[in-house]
Image: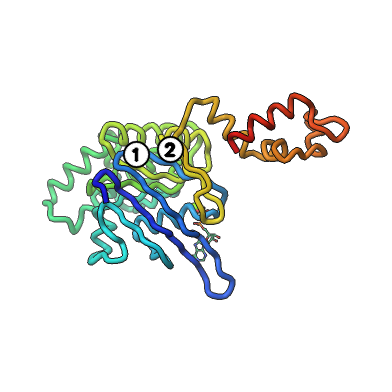
Amino acid sequence: MHNDIIVETHDLTKIYGDGAEVRALDGVNLTIRRGEMVAVMGPSGSGKSTLLNMLGALDRPTSGRVLVNGQDLASLRDVDRFRAQTVGFVFQFYNLLPTLTARENVEVPMQGQPISRSQRRQRAEELLHLVGLGERMHHLPAQLSGGEQQRVAIARALANEPAILLADEPTGNLDTQSGMEVMGLLQEINRQRGMTILLVTHDPRVARTAQRILSMRDGRIVDDHTVGDPLSEDLRELARSLLGRLLQEGKAEPLAAVGLSDNGRLTPAAQTLAELLAAWG
Ligand SMILES: Nc1ncnc2c1ncn2[C@@H]1O[C@H](COP(=O)(O)OP(=O)(O)O)[C@@H](O)[C@H]1O
Ligand SMILES: [Mg+2]
């Protein structure tokens, strides 16, 4: 494996249940380079969280291989150590400990690491400054806004200098403004510190802040592209929308309601649009 590759999966498959089986991941082959910021999109239940959980060794695959930072997760000697040192996790609901201050929350993952108490404290303070919360480090989570709590969670995820940050819908519980601030912070961490970031999102605007977007459906990666200019991203999004699919499939009847078809046929403009979208769908 090349050193600039940080994540590699080979035919990664996860099946849940024994009666009614769910193929949460169905033969996923994925390569992520060091320093990339990648967004994972896809409908609810398409396997996004399962993929992150496999990469973070929070759960085991049914079959296939996962390599993260040169380590084959099937043959890890110390899974806890991998989880603490190699990956940093950020979740939708922050998961901060409510009775600890922001600084103490950031210190938690450093407990058990071979550094002194004062080093832990100093590092937590540096990280809170990095995420813009230097003035709030003695606040409890309940005294912080959602966006601020998520920034504490990001500082905590960085505590042990992980090789990759895995974020599962990090803006899913935030208003648009706070969500964009959190994304701005993740972008900065990616660009300035070269941190590899894999994040799940439902929001196309959030996804566009990454360099690459993976789309999942039914446990498979159905699209994997480099983020382009806003117009091509808009077309891609339109192609995948209900309207885009109706246009591509030439479904004249429902399109009549929005003036895109007449007498059972697509209008010439709709026909042109359908041809354009076919290239992106
Ligand atoms: N622990 C579990 N037990 C059984 N089924 C699960 C479990 N976790 C996820 N699934 C199923 O696997 C599929 C993928 O789930 P998930 O990865 O959470 O999707 P997403 O994050 O894209 O919404 C879904 O059908 C879900 O119901
Ligand atoms: Mg999920």
Q: Quadrant of the rendered structure where residue 60 is?
A: bottom left
Image quarter where the C terminus lies is top right
Residue 159 percent coordinates (x, y) = 24, 47
Q: Which of the pair 229/103 is nearer the observer? A: 229
Q: Would residue 242 be seen by someone viewing this image from the given angle?
A: yes
Q: Answer with left or right where residue 255 lies relative to residue 181.
A: right
Image height of 15 relative to 69, above or below: below
Q: Mark 2: which amino acid?
A: Arg
Question: What kind of element bears circle 1?
Answer: loop
Question: At 11% from the left edge and 51% from the top edge, which residue is drawn?
Answer: 116
Residue 137 percent coordinates (x, y) = 27, 40
- Whether ligand 1 has any atom under 8 Å from the Cβ at mark 1 is answered as no
The residue wearing badge 1 is: 36
Q: Answer with left or right where residue 160 lies relative to residue 89.
A: left
Image height of 41 relative to 132, above or below: below
Q: Which of the pair 138/84 is nearer the observer? A: 84
Q: Would residue 178 be seen by someone viewing this image from the given angle?
A: no
Question: What kind of element bears circle 2?
Answer: strand
The residue wearing badge 2 is: 212
Q: Mark 1: which amino acid?
A: Glu
Q: Answer with left or right where residue 49 lies relative to residue 194.
A: right
Residue 215 percent coordinates (x, y) = 51, 45
Q: Dot 1, crowdedness within 10 Å: few (<14), some or many (≥20)?
A: many
Question: At 62% from the left edge and 33% from the top edge, which residue is drawn?
Answer: 238
Image height of 149 relative to 24, above or below: above
Contact (Cβ within 8 Å) of mark 2 with mark 1: yes
Residue 97 percent coordinates (x, y) = 34, 53
Residue projecting furthest to the bottom: 19
Of the image marks 2 and 1, the number of the one nearer the N terminus: 1
Question: At 54% from the left edge and 28% from the top edge, which residue is drawn?
Answer: 232
